[in-house]
Amino acid sequence: MRKPILICLILSLLFSNHEVFSQKDYQPSPENLKNREWFQDNKYGLFVHWGVYSVMAGGGDMGIAEWIMNQKQIPIVAYENLPGFFNPIEFDAEEWVAMVKKAGMRYITITSKHHDGFAMYDSKASDYNIVKKTPFKRDVLKELKDACDKEGIKLFFYYSQLDWHHPDYFPRGSTGRGYTGRPDSGEWRKYIDYMKDQLTELLTNYGEIGGIWFDGQWDKYDENWYLDEIYSHIHNLQPGALIGSNHHLAPFPGEDFQMFERDLPGENTMGFNKGAEISQELPLEMCETMNGSWGYNIKDRRFKSSSQLLETMIRAAGYGANFLLNTGPLPNGKIQSENVDTLMVMANWLEKNGETIYGTRKGPIEPRPWGVTTQKDNKVYVHMLAWKDESILIPTVGKKVKSATLFGDKSKIRFSETKDGILLTVPYDKRKPLETIVVLEL
Ligand code: FHN
Protein backbone atom coordinates (compact mmCIF):
# COMPACT_ATOMS: atom_id res chain seq x y z
CA MET A 1 0.00 0.00 0.00
CA ARG A 2 1.28 3.48 -0.82
CA LYS A 3 2.40 5.54 2.19
CA PRO A 4 -0.14 8.45 1.94
CA ILE A 5 -3.04 5.98 1.65
CA LEU A 6 -1.77 4.08 4.67
CA ILE A 7 -1.46 7.31 6.68
CA CYS A 8 -5.01 8.35 5.68
CA LEU A 9 -6.31 4.94 6.70
CA ILE A 10 -4.61 5.14 10.09
CA LEU A 11 -5.85 8.69 10.64
CA SER A 12 -9.42 7.81 9.71
CA LEU A 13 -9.31 4.78 12.00
CA LEU A 14 -8.03 6.92 14.84
CA PHE A 15 -10.64 9.54 14.14
CA SER A 16 -13.50 7.06 14.02
CA ASN A 17 -12.37 5.46 17.30
CA HIS A 18 -12.26 8.88 18.83
CA GLU A 19 -15.91 9.39 17.84
CA VAL A 20 -17.06 6.06 19.16
CA PHE A 21 -15.09 6.24 22.37
CA SER A 22 -15.71 9.69 23.70
CA GLN A 23 -18.22 12.46 24.34
CA LYS A 24 -17.45 14.41 21.22
CA ASP A 25 -17.89 18.17 21.22
CA TYR A 26 -18.13 18.14 25.01
CA GLN A 27 -18.26 21.60 26.51
CA PRO A 28 -18.16 21.47 30.30
CA SER A 29 -20.99 23.38 31.94
CA PRO A 30 -20.26 26.37 34.21
CA GLU A 31 -21.10 24.16 37.25
CA ASN A 32 -18.65 21.60 36.01
CA LEU A 33 -15.88 24.16 35.61
CA LYS A 34 -16.64 25.48 39.06
CA ASN A 35 -16.44 21.98 40.49
CA ARG A 36 -13.11 21.42 38.78
CA GLU A 37 -11.80 24.48 40.61
CA TRP A 38 -13.28 23.17 43.86
CA PHE A 39 -11.62 19.83 43.25
CA GLN A 40 -8.23 21.38 42.63
CA ASP A 41 -8.53 23.65 45.64
CA ASN A 42 -9.44 20.86 48.01
CA LYS A 43 -6.67 18.49 47.07
CA TYR A 44 -7.12 15.57 49.47
CA GLY A 45 -9.71 12.80 49.65
CA LEU A 46 -10.36 9.38 51.13
CA PHE A 47 -10.65 6.46 48.73
CA VAL A 48 -12.75 3.61 50.11
CA HIS A 49 -12.69 0.07 48.75
CA TRP A 50 -15.47 -1.71 50.55
CA GLY A 51 -17.45 -4.68 49.43
CA VAL A 52 -18.45 -8.22 50.39
CA TYR A 53 -14.87 -9.28 49.61
CA SER A 54 -13.83 -7.67 52.91
CA VAL A 55 -15.29 -10.73 54.64
CA MET A 56 -12.54 -12.85 53.06
CA ALA A 57 -9.89 -10.32 54.14
CA GLY A 58 -7.58 -11.45 51.36
CA GLY A 59 -7.88 -15.14 52.21
CA GLY A 60 -4.46 -15.20 53.85
CA ASP A 61 -2.66 -14.08 50.71
CA MET A 62 -0.73 -10.86 50.43
CA GLY A 63 -1.98 -8.39 47.87
CA ILE A 64 -5.40 -9.98 47.33
CA ALA A 65 -8.55 -8.26 48.53
CA GLU A 66 -11.20 -6.98 46.14
CA TRP A 67 -9.64 -9.22 43.47
CA ILE A 68 -10.15 -12.44 45.46
CA MET A 69 -12.93 -13.74 43.21
CA ASN A 70 -10.67 -13.61 40.18
CA GLN A 71 -7.38 -14.50 41.88
CA LYS A 72 -8.84 -17.56 43.61
CA GLN A 73 -11.06 -18.41 40.65
CA ILE A 74 -14.22 -18.49 42.74
CA PRO A 75 -17.25 -19.35 40.60
CA ILE A 76 -20.19 -16.94 40.74
CA VAL A 77 -22.44 -19.53 42.38
CA ALA A 78 -19.99 -19.84 45.30
CA TYR A 79 -19.10 -16.13 45.52
CA GLU A 80 -22.81 -15.39 45.79
CA ASN A 81 -22.64 -16.83 49.33
CA LEU A 82 -20.43 -13.97 50.46
CA PRO A 83 -23.16 -11.30 50.75
CA GLY A 84 -24.84 -13.58 53.28
CA PHE A 85 -21.84 -13.16 55.61
CA PHE A 86 -21.59 -9.40 55.21
CA ASN A 87 -23.12 -7.74 58.24
CA PRO A 88 -21.13 -4.62 59.18
CA ILE A 89 -23.11 -3.80 62.30
CA GLU A 90 -20.49 -1.34 63.50
CA PHE A 91 -20.75 0.81 60.40
CA ASP A 92 -21.45 4.40 61.36
CA ALA A 93 -21.41 6.82 58.45
CA GLU A 94 -21.20 9.83 60.73
CA GLU A 95 -18.16 8.40 62.47
CA TRP A 96 -16.45 7.85 59.10
CA VAL A 97 -17.19 11.37 57.96
CA ALA A 98 -16.09 12.91 61.27
CA MET A 99 -12.80 11.05 60.89
CA VAL A 100 -12.43 12.24 57.29
CA LYS A 101 -13.03 15.81 58.38
CA LYS A 102 -10.55 15.58 61.21
CA ALA A 103 -8.04 14.12 58.78
CA GLY A 104 -8.21 17.29 56.68
CA MET A 105 -9.76 15.41 53.79
CA ARG A 106 -12.39 17.16 51.73
CA TYR A 107 -14.03 14.36 49.77
CA ILE A 108 -14.67 10.63 49.71
CA THR A 109 -14.63 8.34 46.70
CA ILE A 110 -16.28 5.01 47.51
CA THR A 111 -16.82 1.83 45.54
CA SER A 112 -20.46 1.65 44.50
CA LYS A 113 -19.71 -1.50 42.52
CA HIS A 114 -16.31 -3.14 42.11
CA HIS A 115 -15.24 -5.74 39.55
CA ASP A 116 -17.16 -8.47 41.44
CA GLY A 117 -20.36 -6.79 40.23
CA PHE A 118 -21.90 -6.44 43.70
CA ALA A 119 -23.70 -3.13 44.23
CA MET A 120 -23.04 -1.54 47.62
CA TYR A 121 -26.29 0.42 47.38
CA ASP A 122 -30.00 -0.10 46.86
CA SER A 123 -30.00 -0.86 43.14
CA LYS A 124 -33.25 -1.59 41.34
CA ALA A 125 -31.34 -2.59 38.23
CA SER A 126 -30.14 -5.76 39.97
CA ASP A 127 -30.92 -7.68 43.14
CA TYR A 128 -27.23 -8.35 43.51
CA ASN A 129 -26.91 -5.55 46.03
CA ILE A 130 -26.33 -4.84 49.70
CA VAL A 131 -30.00 -4.21 50.55
CA LYS A 132 -31.35 -7.36 48.89
CA LYS A 133 -28.59 -9.86 49.54
CA THR A 134 -26.99 -9.10 52.89
CA PRO A 135 -28.36 -9.46 56.42
CA PHE A 136 -27.36 -5.82 56.88
CA LYS A 137 -29.97 -4.61 54.37
CA ARG A 138 -28.84 -0.97 54.63
CA ASP A 139 -27.84 1.34 51.81
CA VAL A 140 -24.41 2.42 52.99
CA LEU A 141 -24.00 4.93 50.18
CA LYS A 142 -27.19 6.68 51.21
CA GLU A 143 -26.09 6.85 54.84
CA LEU A 144 -22.68 8.11 53.82
CA LYS A 145 -24.15 10.74 51.52
CA ASP A 146 -26.41 12.05 54.29
CA ALA A 147 -23.47 12.24 56.68
CA CYS A 148 -21.29 13.92 54.03
CA ASP A 149 -23.97 16.52 53.29
CA LYS A 150 -24.14 17.44 56.96
CA GLU A 151 -20.40 18.04 57.09
CA GLY A 152 -19.78 19.59 53.69
CA ILE A 153 -17.76 16.64 52.41
CA LYS A 154 -18.23 15.75 48.75
CA LEU A 155 -19.00 12.19 47.75
CA PHE A 156 -17.81 10.56 44.54
CA PHE A 157 -18.81 7.11 43.37
CA TYR A 158 -16.28 4.63 42.04
CA TYR A 159 -17.98 2.45 39.43
CA SER A 160 -16.37 -0.58 37.80
CA GLN A 161 -17.24 -0.91 34.15
CA LEU A 162 -15.62 -4.34 34.32
CA ASP A 163 -18.02 -6.91 35.77
CA TRP A 164 -17.20 -10.53 36.70
CA HIS A 165 -20.81 -11.32 37.56
CA HIS A 166 -23.08 -9.97 34.85
CA PRO A 167 -23.83 -12.52 32.09
CA ASP A 168 -23.93 -9.87 29.37
CA TYR A 169 -20.42 -8.71 30.11
CA PHE A 170 -19.53 -10.54 26.91
CA PRO A 171 -17.25 -10.97 25.06
CA ARG A 172 -15.10 -11.28 28.17
CA GLY A 173 -11.98 -9.25 28.63
CA SER A 174 -8.64 -10.18 30.15
CA THR A 175 -10.17 -11.15 33.54
CA GLY A 176 -13.29 -12.91 34.86
CA ARG A 177 -13.03 -15.66 32.29
CA GLY A 178 -13.92 -19.37 32.45
CA TYR A 179 -14.06 -20.01 36.19
CA THR A 180 -17.05 -17.71 36.79
CA GLY A 181 -19.39 -20.28 35.28
CA ARG A 182 -21.13 -17.84 32.95
CA PRO A 183 -22.27 -19.27 29.60
CA ASP A 184 -20.10 -18.24 26.70
CA SER A 185 -22.68 -15.87 25.34
CA GLY A 186 -24.25 -12.53 26.20
CA GLU A 187 -25.28 -9.24 24.65
CA TRP A 188 -22.82 -6.43 25.18
CA ARG A 189 -25.43 -3.76 24.49
CA LYS A 190 -27.60 -5.20 27.27
CA TYR A 191 -24.67 -4.84 29.66
CA ILE A 192 -24.22 -1.22 28.59
CA ASP A 193 -27.92 -0.58 29.30
CA TYR A 194 -27.55 -2.21 32.69
CA MET A 195 -24.56 -0.03 33.52
CA LYS A 196 -26.47 3.01 32.34
CA ASP A 197 -29.40 2.08 34.60
CA GLN A 198 -27.11 1.73 37.58
CA LEU A 199 -25.42 5.04 36.84
CA THR A 200 -28.83 6.67 36.55
CA GLU A 201 -29.61 5.41 40.04
CA LEU A 202 -26.34 6.76 41.39
CA LEU A 203 -26.93 10.13 39.77
CA THR A 204 -30.58 10.53 40.70
CA ASN A 205 -31.09 8.90 44.10
CA TYR A 206 -28.30 10.52 46.11
CA GLY A 207 -28.66 14.22 45.43
CA GLU A 208 -25.73 16.12 44.03
CA ILE A 209 -22.61 13.98 43.90
CA GLY A 210 -19.00 14.94 43.25
CA GLY A 211 -18.66 12.68 40.25
CA ILE A 212 -18.08 9.20 38.88
CA TRP A 213 -14.71 7.48 39.14
CA PHE A 214 -14.67 4.79 36.45
CA ASP A 215 -12.39 1.80 36.49
CA GLY A 216 -12.03 -1.32 34.37
CA GLN A 217 -11.98 -0.11 30.80
CA TRP A 218 -8.48 -1.59 30.64
CA ASP A 219 -10.07 -5.07 30.78
CA LYS A 220 -11.05 -4.69 27.10
CA TYR A 221 -9.23 -1.84 25.46
CA ASP A 222 -10.74 -2.56 22.05
CA GLU A 223 -14.34 -2.70 23.23
CA ASN A 224 -16.94 -0.07 22.40
CA TRP A 225 -17.74 1.29 25.86
CA TYR A 226 -20.25 3.76 24.47
CA LEU A 227 -18.44 6.51 26.29
CA ASP A 228 -20.11 9.15 24.19
CA GLU A 229 -23.53 7.97 25.31
CA ILE A 230 -22.55 7.20 28.92
CA TYR A 231 -20.63 10.41 29.52
CA SER A 232 -23.39 12.53 27.91
CA HIS A 233 -25.96 10.73 30.02
CA ILE A 234 -24.05 11.50 33.22
CA HIS A 235 -23.51 15.11 32.28
CA ASN A 236 -27.17 15.48 31.32
CA LEU A 237 -28.28 14.16 34.68
CA GLN A 238 -25.73 16.18 36.64
CA PRO A 239 -23.79 18.66 34.53
CA GLY A 240 -21.55 19.47 37.47
CA ALA A 241 -20.51 15.85 38.14
CA LEU A 242 -16.87 15.24 37.37
CA ILE A 243 -16.07 12.18 35.31
CA GLY A 244 -12.71 10.48 35.56
CA SER A 245 -11.66 7.08 34.29
CA ASN A 246 -8.80 4.91 35.40
CA HIS A 247 -8.11 3.52 31.93
CA HIS A 248 -4.44 4.48 32.24
CA LEU A 249 -4.59 6.35 28.92
CA ALA A 250 -4.73 10.04 28.07
CA PRO A 251 -8.17 11.45 28.93
CA PHE A 252 -11.00 11.08 26.41
CA PRO A 253 -13.31 14.00 25.63
CA GLY A 254 -16.09 14.03 28.21
CA GLU A 255 -13.72 13.33 31.10
CA ASP A 256 -13.27 16.09 33.63
CA PHE A 257 -10.14 14.95 35.43
CA GLN A 258 -7.21 12.65 34.83
CA MET A 259 -6.10 10.08 37.34
CA PHE A 260 -2.91 8.20 38.09
CA GLU A 261 -2.79 4.97 40.07
CA ARG A 262 -0.08 4.60 42.70
CA ASP A 263 2.33 6.76 40.73
CA LEU A 264 2.91 10.45 40.42
CA PRO A 265 1.85 11.88 37.06
CA GLY A 266 4.24 10.66 34.41
CA GLU A 267 5.87 7.99 36.59
CA ASN A 268 5.44 4.31 35.88
CA THR A 269 6.78 2.27 38.77
CA MET A 270 3.56 0.22 38.86
CA GLY A 271 3.42 -0.55 35.16
CA PHE A 272 -0.05 0.99 34.69
CA ASN A 273 0.97 4.19 32.97
CA LYS A 274 1.00 3.44 29.26
CA GLY A 275 2.84 6.64 28.44
CA ALA A 276 -0.33 8.69 28.76
CA GLU A 277 0.28 12.36 28.27
CA ILE A 278 -0.39 14.49 31.30
CA SER A 279 -3.31 16.79 30.63
CA GLN A 280 -2.38 20.47 30.82
CA GLU A 281 -6.02 21.43 31.08
CA LEU A 282 -7.81 18.97 33.36
CA PRO A 283 -7.43 18.57 37.11
CA LEU A 284 -5.21 15.64 38.08
CA GLU A 285 -5.52 13.11 40.86
CA MET A 286 -3.19 10.45 42.16
CA CYS A 287 -4.56 7.54 44.20
CA GLU A 288 -2.46 5.56 46.65
CA THR A 289 -2.87 2.67 49.09
CA MET A 290 -1.92 2.85 52.77
CA ASN A 291 -0.41 -0.64 52.65
CA GLY A 292 -0.24 -2.74 49.48
CA SER A 293 -3.97 -3.49 49.17
CA TRP A 294 -7.10 -1.57 48.24
CA GLY A 295 -9.71 -3.70 50.00
CA TYR A 296 -9.14 -5.08 53.49
CA ASN A 297 -6.35 -7.65 53.67
CA ILE A 298 -5.74 -9.11 57.10
CA LYS A 299 -2.17 -10.12 56.35
CA ASP A 300 -0.99 -6.95 54.70
CA ARG A 301 0.98 -5.12 57.39
CA ARG A 302 3.14 -3.19 54.94
CA PHE A 303 1.70 0.09 56.18
CA LYS A 304 3.37 3.12 54.71
CA SER A 305 4.53 5.65 57.24
CA SER A 306 2.77 8.96 57.63
CA SER A 307 5.98 10.69 56.45
CA GLN A 308 6.09 8.60 53.31
CA LEU A 309 2.46 9.35 52.51
CA LEU A 310 2.84 13.02 53.34
CA GLU A 311 5.81 13.27 51.05
CA THR A 312 3.78 11.70 48.25
CA MET A 313 0.93 14.09 48.90
CA ILE A 314 3.28 17.09 48.77
CA ARG A 315 4.95 15.82 45.62
CA ALA A 316 1.52 15.25 44.04
CA ALA A 317 0.57 18.84 44.87
CA GLY A 318 3.78 19.90 43.10
CA TYR A 319 2.28 18.38 39.95
CA GLY A 320 -1.01 20.12 40.71
CA ALA A 321 -2.50 16.71 41.50
CA ASN A 322 -4.95 15.77 44.24
CA PHE A 323 -4.11 12.95 46.60
CA LEU A 324 -6.76 10.24 47.02
CA LEU A 325 -5.61 8.04 49.86
CA ASN A 326 -7.23 4.65 50.24
CA THR A 327 -8.57 2.65 53.12
CA GLY A 328 -10.18 -0.80 53.02
CA PRO A 329 -12.74 -0.88 55.83
CA LEU A 330 -13.16 -4.01 57.94
CA PRO A 331 -16.11 -6.34 57.36
CA ASN A 332 -17.62 -5.03 60.61
CA GLY A 333 -17.79 -1.50 59.20
CA LYS A 334 -14.89 0.02 61.11
CA ILE A 335 -11.95 1.79 59.50
CA GLN A 336 -8.67 -0.01 60.25
CA SER A 337 -7.23 1.65 63.35
CA GLU A 338 -3.71 1.68 61.84
CA ASN A 339 -5.11 3.78 58.99
CA VAL A 340 -6.87 6.18 61.35
CA ASP A 341 -3.64 6.67 63.32
CA THR A 342 -1.69 7.49 60.17
CA LEU A 343 -4.37 9.88 58.95
CA MET A 344 -4.33 11.73 62.24
CA VAL A 345 -0.56 12.27 62.07
CA MET A 346 -1.00 13.60 58.55
CA ALA A 347 -3.80 15.81 59.83
CA ASN A 348 -1.37 17.45 62.26
CA TRP A 349 0.96 18.32 59.43
CA LEU A 350 -1.92 19.70 57.37
CA GLU A 351 -3.20 21.73 60.24
CA LYS A 352 0.14 23.50 60.40
CA ASN A 353 1.10 23.54 56.75
CA GLY A 354 -2.20 23.21 54.89
CA GLU A 355 -1.86 26.68 53.41
CA THR A 356 0.95 25.37 51.19
CA ILE A 357 -1.33 22.65 49.75
CA TYR A 358 -5.04 23.59 49.83
CA GLY A 359 -6.07 26.16 47.26
CA THR A 360 -2.74 25.94 45.47
CA ARG A 361 -1.83 24.95 41.93
CA LYS A 362 1.44 23.53 40.74
CA GLY A 363 4.26 25.99 41.13
CA PRO A 364 6.46 27.59 38.50
CA ILE A 365 9.26 25.03 38.90
CA GLU A 366 8.64 21.51 37.58
CA PRO A 367 8.86 18.83 40.30
CA ARG A 368 12.44 17.83 41.03
CA PRO A 369 14.04 15.08 43.13
CA TRP A 370 15.01 17.72 45.74
CA GLY A 371 11.44 18.98 46.10
CA VAL A 372 8.44 20.66 44.55
CA THR A 373 6.76 24.03 44.37
CA THR A 374 3.12 24.99 44.77
CA GLN A 375 1.65 28.41 44.17
CA LYS A 376 -1.21 30.61 45.27
CA ASP A 377 -1.59 34.22 44.17
CA ASN A 378 1.78 35.92 44.59
CA LYS A 379 3.25 33.24 46.85
CA VAL A 380 5.36 30.31 45.76
CA TYR A 381 5.87 27.57 48.34
CA VAL A 382 9.17 25.78 47.87
CA HIS A 383 8.97 22.38 49.60
CA MET A 384 12.54 21.27 50.19
CA LEU A 385 12.03 17.54 50.57
CA ALA A 386 15.40 16.00 49.89
CA TRP A 387 18.07 18.69 49.92
CA LYS A 388 20.98 18.14 52.28
CA ASP A 389 23.15 21.24 51.78
CA GLU A 390 22.59 24.65 53.30
CA SER A 391 22.27 26.44 49.96
CA ILE A 392 20.44 25.48 46.84
CA LEU A 393 20.19 27.12 43.42
CA ILE A 394 16.67 26.82 42.10
CA PRO A 395 15.44 28.00 38.68
CA THR A 396 13.99 31.49 38.40
CA VAL A 397 10.24 31.69 38.83
CA GLY A 398 9.22 34.10 36.10
CA LYS A 399 8.72 37.12 38.34
CA LYS A 400 10.96 39.08 40.65
CA VAL A 401 11.16 37.68 44.18
CA LYS A 402 10.39 40.31 46.82
CA SER A 403 11.11 38.25 49.89
CA ALA A 404 11.91 34.73 51.04
CA THR A 405 10.73 33.51 54.42
CA LEU A 406 10.45 30.20 56.14
CA PHE A 407 6.87 29.01 56.33
CA GLY A 408 5.92 28.65 59.98
CA ASP A 409 8.19 30.89 62.00
CA LYS A 410 8.37 33.45 59.15
CA SER A 411 12.10 33.92 59.63
CA LYS A 412 13.90 35.64 56.74
CA ILE A 413 15.76 33.38 54.36
CA ARG A 414 18.88 34.66 52.64
CA PHE A 415 18.43 34.67 48.87
CA SER A 416 20.00 36.18 45.81
CA GLU A 417 18.48 36.21 42.38
CA THR A 418 20.55 36.09 39.20
CA LYS A 419 19.81 35.09 35.65
CA ASP A 420 21.06 31.60 36.57
CA GLY A 421 18.49 31.13 39.26
CA ILE A 422 17.67 31.87 42.86
CA LEU A 423 20.20 30.94 45.49
CA LEU A 424 18.46 30.09 48.75
CA THR A 425 20.22 29.48 52.02
CA VAL A 426 18.28 27.70 54.73
CA PRO A 427 20.38 27.27 57.89
CA TYR A 428 20.65 23.71 59.12
CA ASP A 429 19.10 24.56 62.44
CA LYS A 430 15.97 25.79 60.68
CA ARG A 431 15.34 22.54 58.83
CA LYS A 432 12.74 19.97 59.70
CA PRO A 433 11.84 16.91 57.66
CA LEU A 434 8.84 17.71 55.43
CA GLU A 435 8.58 21.13 57.01
CA THR A 436 11.33 23.04 55.30
CA ILE A 437 9.09 25.22 53.21
CA VAL A 438 10.36 28.51 51.84
CA VAL A 439 7.78 31.07 50.84
CA LEU A 440 8.81 33.27 47.96
CA GLU A 441 6.74 36.39 47.71
CA LEU A 442 6.64 37.65 44.13
O1 FHN B 1 -8.38 -3.40 39.64
C1 FHN B 1 -8.55 -2.18 40.30
C2 FHN B 1 -8.14 -2.25 41.74
O2 FHN B 1 -8.87 -3.24 42.38
C3 FHN B 1 -8.40 -0.92 42.39
O3 FHN B 1 -9.77 -0.59 42.36
C4 FHN B 1 -7.59 0.15 41.69
C5 FHN B 1 -7.80 1.53 42.22
O4 FHN B 1 -7.14 2.45 41.43
N1 FHN B 1 -7.88 0.17 40.25
C6 FHN B 1 -7.87 -1.08 39.52
C7 FHN B 1 -6.65 -1.39 38.84
O5 FHN B 1 -6.27 -0.41 37.91
Image: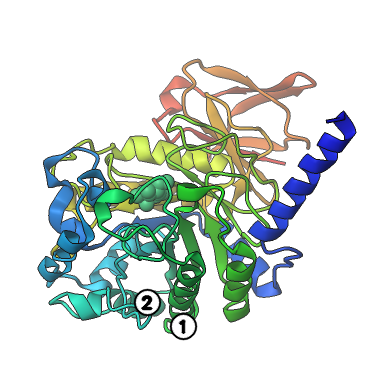
Label placed on residue 207: 1
Residue 403 in the image: state x and y as whole percent. Answer: 67, 36
99 or 244, which is in the foreground? Answer: 244
Way the structure is coloured = rainbow
Label placed on residue 145: 2
Q: Is residue 396 above or below residue 309?
A: above
Q: Secondary structure at mark 2?
A: helix
Rendered image quadrant of residue 421: top right
Which of pointers 1 and 2 lies earlier in the amino acid sequence?
A: 2
Q: Residues within 10 Å of mark 1 (few under 14, many from 20)?
A: few
Q: Secondary structure at mark 1?
A: loop
Q: Is residue 29 above or below residue 344?
A: below
Q: Are marks 1 and 2 in contact (CB under 8 Å)?
A: yes
- Amino acid found under the numbered disc labelled 1: Gly
- Amino acid found under the numbered disc labelled 2: Lys
Q: Is residue 368 above or below residue 236?
A: above
